[in-house]
Amino acid sequence: MDFNDTPEEAAFRAKARAWLESNVPADWRERAAKGSIQDVCKEWQRIKYDAGWACLNWPKEYGGQGFTPMQSVIWSQEENKIAPPSAAMLVVGLGMTGPMLMVHGTEEQKKQHLPPMARADVIWCQLFSEPAGGSDLAALRTRAVKDGDEWVVNGQKIWSSGAHQSDWAILVTRTDPTVPKHKGLTFFIVDMKTPGIEPRPIKQISGAAHFNEVYLTDVRIPDSNRISGVGNGWNVAMTILMNERLAVGSTGGAGGIGASWESLFEMARTLEGEDGPVIQDAAVRERLADWYVREAGIRNVNARTISALSRGDTPGPEASISKMVIGPQKQNMASFAMDLQDMAGGIMDPKIAPLHAAFQQSLLGSPAGRIAGGTDEIMRNIIAERVLGMPGDIRVDKDLPFNEIPTGGKAA
């Protein structure tokens, strides 16, 4: 693959860079360090949208610009260098729900939901995981029962990022427990203000409360909010998860705040040790070089995915490679950075900690990235089976009707 820009791509890159340099808010890092990253990201998305730089490869009628996938990639490369990172509250909409609606949504659903999503006027969350399901999404028990032109939903979801601050949600439910677990699922979009939806924030080790458990009690969803056919929820969910892993793998290792390689390198270059800047230590340079090689590998894997996107294909299982590498790497880099900071590494107060405690926050937050969108173990299974073609694990419940799968000694 030729990674050099064509003359047309080089001209577009120069145009994008010039606009970014003139329009990125100069104080966004300081504001983000003070805890207002969500507001910063929403503000930046609206600036881009109003100037014609948001969702570049989306069709114009849905709030995009109709640019090529390669132009969108070039824009992202330049944006990641100096602009605010994508916040989780926007990734669920822009990186997951939007692409899913392009594939599975009706024309009415696309026109209603995509433009306000592109401008960050409507924030989305994901109602997938459940307390008893673990890493097996197909084991979900939230039920949806048809009642006229509506569906009545009862159940519980957990680890729903930003659910307490979101306007709409993507929801996968079980509509037929008499068929194998992957075949009895149906997918919906739902207004979070619908009666019966109760988000409860979960306190995290970092002190934040970004995750939620969400209770759904007799929630009535119109059939017009169903995505794709009844029983096709698993295929829709897979489209979501492939795009989620692509979004995490594409943005998790570059730019922004926290434990990025660039910020770690800059810290090592400027941080004074006993014998001068710590980057003069061969062991430090060795670790930095190893992580740089890993990030270069991620970029090359992503380039393969970009080629698929340019052909109009859906992101494939190779996106799992980037996600599996990014999660542990961010955690390891944050831990290493805190070691380099010596006693200052234990300071969490952003007002006095080095780099506003970005690495400290990253260390506490990065384990979540190794779970969200599929655990490291699930990623390894996907890579082994669907990328390398190795035999799959034995799954004794694969072809059983869901209501015949034993659970805790009782039938489901």
Image (spheres, grey):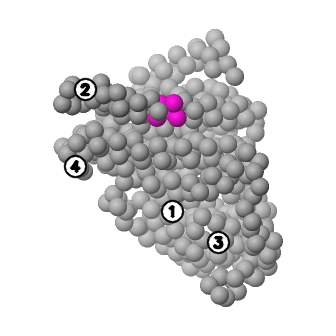
**In the rendered image, which residue does mark 4 sit on?**
347
Residue type at tag 1: Ser
- Indicate whether residue 294 is drawn in magenta: yes
- The residue depicted at 66 percent of the width and 55 percent of the height is 381
- Foreground of the two, 341 or 115: 341
Mark 1 neighbour density, 10 Å: few (under 14) some (14–19) many (20 or more): many
Residue type at tag 3: Leu
**In the rendered image, which residue does mark 2 sit on?**
277
Residues rendered magenta in the picture: 291-295
Mark 3 neighbour density, 10 Å: few (under 14) some (14–19) many (20 or more): many
Q: Nearer the viewer, mark 3 or mark 2?
A: 2
Q: Disc 1 versus disc 2: distance between alpha carbons?
A: 42 Å
Quadrant in which the C terminus appears: bottom right
Q: Is residue 267 above or below residue 135?
A: above
Whether residue 371 is visible here, answered yes or no, is: yes
Q: Position of residue 88 (x, y in %)?
A: 48, 50
At numbered mark 2, what does the secondary structure look like: helix, strand or loop? strand
- N-terminal-most mark, 3 or 2: 3
**In the rendered image, which residue does mark 3 sit on?**
140
